[in-house]
Amino acid sequence: MELAVTGKKTKIEVSDAVFGRDFSEPLVHQVVTAYLAGARAGTKAQKNRSAVSGGGRKPWKQKGTGRARAGTIRSPIWRGGGKTFAATPRDHSQKLNKKMYRAGMQSILSELVRQDRLKVVDKFDISAPKTKDAVAFLDKLGVTSGTLVMEEMSPEVLLATRNIPGIYVTDVAGLDPASLVSSDDVVMTVDALQKVQEWLA
């Protein structure tokens, strides 16, 4: 299949396997969920009764005081005691085969092409780190929010777009399924498109 390059009369040949795949909602859901789960820190932690300092001595004798028996001042029912079901650091990542991940990305990109949400440009016409240049470039494409994908990260493009709400800039190495799914439009350079195709083919 062929994709038109915005602003030019030429078209670029792309693989049907990458940009012409049928959309699979369950697969895309699994890929996005696994990506978001892997991004979770999982560093939540609380102290149980063994981790709280102190409380090594029995606070009072077992019998004869008239008070409830107690073995430690670090009991969960005491103020300053440990947590009964303490949260511990854990890994939230989900196992996902590379073949499934690539298939999910192919499905997302193919759906973007079908919905005319994937725009291909020869290059980003942003030579200076100025927001007004980036706004003018995006207005020319008719893009108000979305993801800009380039082959390698450009400091000029990054600085020019960082103050524009709803615009996310990344290179091919940092491309992820969550940002693609949530983007209204995806603008990709020809070089980035070819690199994505090599990666997912």
Image (cartoon, grey):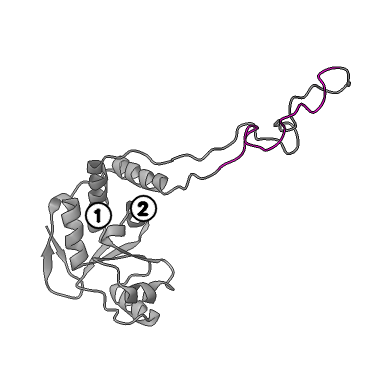
Residue lying at 16% horizontally and 61% vertically, measured from the top left: 194
Against 28, residue 189 (above or below) is: below
Residue farthest to the front, as pictured? 57
Q: Quadrant of residue 72?
A: top right
Q: Is residue 113 left or right of residue 182?
A: left
Residue lying at 86% horizontally and 23% vertically, measured from the top left: 67
| Mark 2 burial class by Cα count in 10 Å: few <14, some 14-19, many 20+ | some
| Mark 1 burial class by Cα count in 10 Å: few <14, some 14-19, many 20+ | many
Against 47, residue 201 (above or below) is: below
Query: Which image quadrant: the N terminus?
Result: bottom left
Foreground of the two, 149 or 58: 58
Foreground of the two, 73 or 24: 73
Residue type marked 1: Leu
Q: Which residue is mark 1?
A: 109
Circle on res. 178: 2
Against 171, residue 201 (above or below) is: above
Q: Position of residue 121 (x, y in %)?
A: 22, 71
Q: Position of residue 117 (x, y in %)?
A: 28, 61
Q: CA distance from mark 2 to mark 1?
A: 12 Å
Q: Earlier in the sequence, mark 2 or mark 1?
A: 1
The segment highlighted magenta reads 45-63
From this viewpoint, is residue 19 visible? Answer: no
Foreground of the two, 175 or 106: 175
Residue lying at 48% horizontally and 44% vertically, measured from the top left: 42
- What is the secondary structure assignment of the residue under circle 2? helix
From this viewpoint, is residue 90 visible? Answer: yes
Q: Position of residue 101 (x, y in %)?
A: 27, 45
Q: Quadrant of residue 187?
A: bottom left
